[in-house]
Image: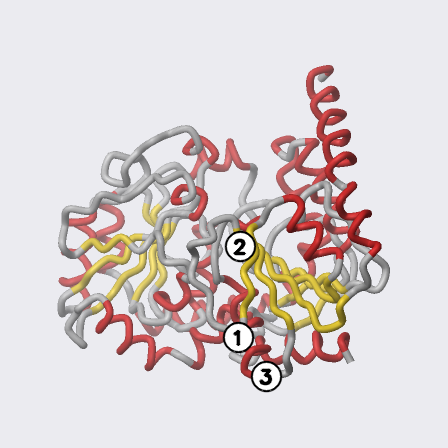
Amino acid sequence: MASDTFYLWKRKLKAAIQSLPFYLWRLRPIQRSKIVFTTIEGTTGFTCNPKYIALELLRRSKGYDLVWLVNDMTKPFPKGIRKVHNTLWNRARELSTAAVWVDNSRKQLEVRKRKGQFYLQTWHAKLGFKPTCLDRGASFSRIAELVSRHDSAMIDLVLSNSDWYDRTLPTGMIYTGPTLRSGSPRCDILIGGRDAQRRSIREQYRLAPDTRILMYCPTFRGGSQATNRTIEKGDHAPDYNRLLCALCEKFGGRWVIFLRLHPQLTARHIAAHAENQDLIDVSTVDDMYELLAACDAFLTDYSSAAFDAAVMNIPVFLYCDDYSAYEGERGKLLWDLRDLPFPLAEDDGEMGRRIAGFQQTAYLEKLGKLFRECGVEESGEASKRVADVIEQHLA
């Protein structure tokens, strides 16, 4: 406990020192046309909810100064987005002089917000499996709580897509402020852009037009941080050949798997060395939702993207060979996975049986019931609604 207290003291001292540039840049006025975007503390590129909000603002051609803080300056961005290297000095300059912040994860402990600035938090998950913040219980560290409370105190508005998400915010995000029932901007493409993406992605990956795609997105595990593993040798992954055979037997046609590792693994240069021609590694693609819109089925263990994929009414399967152990490490999940519409398997044999026994009609009935009970609202117009709110603030 003493060492934990000393670590917290050091972090607070470091944050206080690093906050000085934020106060220095307050000598400059807030620029009413500047909007600063960040995703996962700058570790990812043009992606997630902030991407689709930025695209909508670009479409409106109002002459905004759209700034994106990013760690890797080789990441591509469209014309009209000014990418800035996410250093402490640059972060302090851009954030301190912006009228609006848009982020999908926590701000660093040194960040200081000025009076009159508007902080829109989109987060990177809505309905989800994994407990966060206070819902983690004893596994929620003191430093994580410190950072979370610091960030939540600065937020002006959180995007929501459901009654369920609103109810989880006080403990799941330590936030009790206002929400905007906009839906998830990143899901807009899953509702209104599927036909175009199906054609485009198959052309991009040189697949026949009738090829069927399953996206597999394993979640991030804390134990993977120091492990330099490949996906074939890694634990918790299904047998891909058996998975492909089961899909072909049940649904017919040729299937391929889009394999997407968690961004925290790709940031550590942990790659999937796929030897099977029907296993395509898409981990380094910044925006998984452009790919997901083209898919015919989805597989994960504990990723909240399962609920987003389900918006398209495609089959969603869960492969959780460490269900009990994962709950022991992470904290009790927010759902009993066996009660959800998504067929759950804990080994390869069960995975094959779940696919073989999949019934579309029953699945859609259960899915519709779940979404109604949670009050889910995803209209495909979220980006427009959020852009309207930002423009109202800037007016």
Q: Find disc 2 in the rendering and name its residue.
A: 128
Q: Find disc 3 in the rendering and name its residue.
A: 61
In the picture, measured across the screen, residue 177 lies left or right of residue 303, that is right
Q: Earlier in the sequence, mark 2 or mark 3?
A: 3
Measuring from the top left, give residue 53's x and y in whole percent. Answer: 57, 72
Q: Earlier in the sequence, mark 1 or mark 3?
A: 1
- Chosen colour scheme: secondary structure
Screen quadrant of the N terminus: top right
Q: Are marks 1 and 3 in contact (CB under 8 Å)?
A: no
Measuring from the top left, give residue 5's x and y in whole percent. Answer: 74, 21
For marks 2 and 3, give the CA distance. Answer: 35 Å
Few, some or many C-alpha atoms within 10 Å of disc 3 (few <14, some 14-19, many ≥20)? few
| In the foreground, 98 or 368 | 98
Screen quadrant of the C terminus: bottom right
| In the foreground, 46 or 189 | 46
Measuring from the top left, give residue 176's x and y in whole percent. Answer: 78, 56
Q: Amino acid at mark 2?
A: Gly
Q: Is residue 76 above or below residue 378?
A: above
